[in-house]
Image: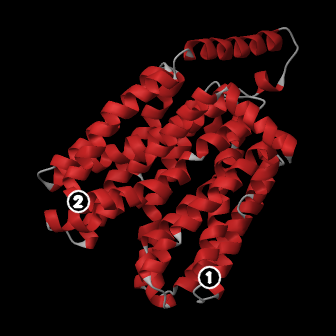
Amino acid sequence: MTEGLVGYLRFLSAHRRFLVFGFTLAFFSSFGQTFFISLFGEKIRATFDLTHGSFGLCYSLATLASGFTIIWLGKKLDDVDLRVFSVLLCAGLAAACLGMSVAPVVAALAVAIYLLRLTGQGLLSHTAMTSMARYFHEQRGKAMSVAGLGFPAGEAVLPIAAVLVMTQIGWRQTWLAIAVAVGLLVIPLVIWLLRGHHVRHAEHVETLARAERDAASGDSTAQARTQWSRRQVLRDLRFYLLLPAVMAPGFIVTGVFFHQVHLVETKGWELTWFAGCFAVYAATQLPSGLIAGPLVDRFGATRLLPVFLLPMTLSLVVLAMSSHVMAAPLFMALAGITGGIGSPIVGSMWAEVYGVRHLGAIRAMVTAIMVFGTAGSPVGMGWLIDAGVTMEAISWMCCAYTVIATVVAWVALRR
């Protein structure tokens, strides 16, 4: 245990700036996530005279549009200098926040939400994880674990801060303050953290070139054999068999969280109690993510992928079988474990299976598919609820989904 901790600390010290860069992008991607934007939902609906349904439709359409854009724009990470790409993303995020603060009509609001979802939820998280997977090889799992801590850190800190600021200056001014903070603080920080990145990138390019030379001379290595293009991936059956497992956490958690008011009403819980349990969700992600990183480096992500949904499956069993008040934090804790171990396992898995040369294009496609999934789960669960299906039954359905997805992923990785 001590040796593992010392190894982690040495790794952090040796690569601290680049790891903080990944953490920073993951942290500030929160501004485009559903849990953050939904904090302003009531104020937005009142300002623009929107119903729950009309605001949900606006949000879903903006999310779907961002997903289609990510497929094209996320691929640029393979070709554009990381420093330029990251600064442009942060500038786009600042523009989106500014748009939220000044939007005069619903159409302008929809554009601002589209930009938030594109830059925040989509491209910032995509850039953070792809960069860690691309530039770390032997310690890829650790790198993705450290950078992935930005997600639960944002979930734990930013909602509370936003609510406090909103009560003091109003919802529009809060978005304006965020835009100023991103422009004046985040962009300079990203530029500083990526100083000297050209050296790291040159070493990465030389590593790939050496592998290709070895392959051409007959000394084919795993690195040379697995540099798949996005077109090749789309023709690979394994990709489609892996997708259900990869999509499961985001699809299920988004749907349950979106319908949390209905959930707590049917369970007889207090909404404030369930909302407070989000801290448990964030807290369990932190240690589980750190533990998963070294395991990925030791055993490989492809070996661990078939088991990463087990905590999520157990969380759904708890939700389906119990209405006890302590079922809420237990559900959050188990779901948080899957969320924590998912970043290093899933992120590293794509690099292990398909290589890193076209990783930006591949992960952009996966990110877009996951965005589509998170856009569809609130609607799908909403239809089931309207049809009289109970949350317990929905939980069992999701539980069955995770089990089937796990078996299918196991079969895919044995091919």
Q: Which mark is residue 168?
A: 2
Residue toward you, 304 or 146: 146
Instruction: Identify the amino acid type marked 1.
Output: Ala
Q: Is residue 346 above or below residue 249?
A: above
At x 52% / y 67%, what residue is drawn?
278
Task: Answer with the quarter of the image where residue 393 lies.
Answer: bottom right
Q: Could you say whether the residue bearing mark 1 is in a helix, strand or loop?
A: helix
Instruction: Identify the amino acid type marked 2.
Output: Gln
Residue toward you, 134 or 37: 37
Residue 13 lies, in percent from the top left, at 68, 29
For disc 2, the neighbor class at 10 Å (few under 14, some 14 to 19, many from 20) is few
**Relative horizontal placement of residue 256, taking residue 280 as reference (left or right):** left
Q: Which mark is residue 327?
A: 1
Q: Is residue 81 above or below residue 353?
A: above
Q: Is residue 89 visible?
A: no
Task: Answer with the quarter of the image where residue 98 lies.
Answer: top left
Residue 83 lies, in percent from the top left, at 47, 21
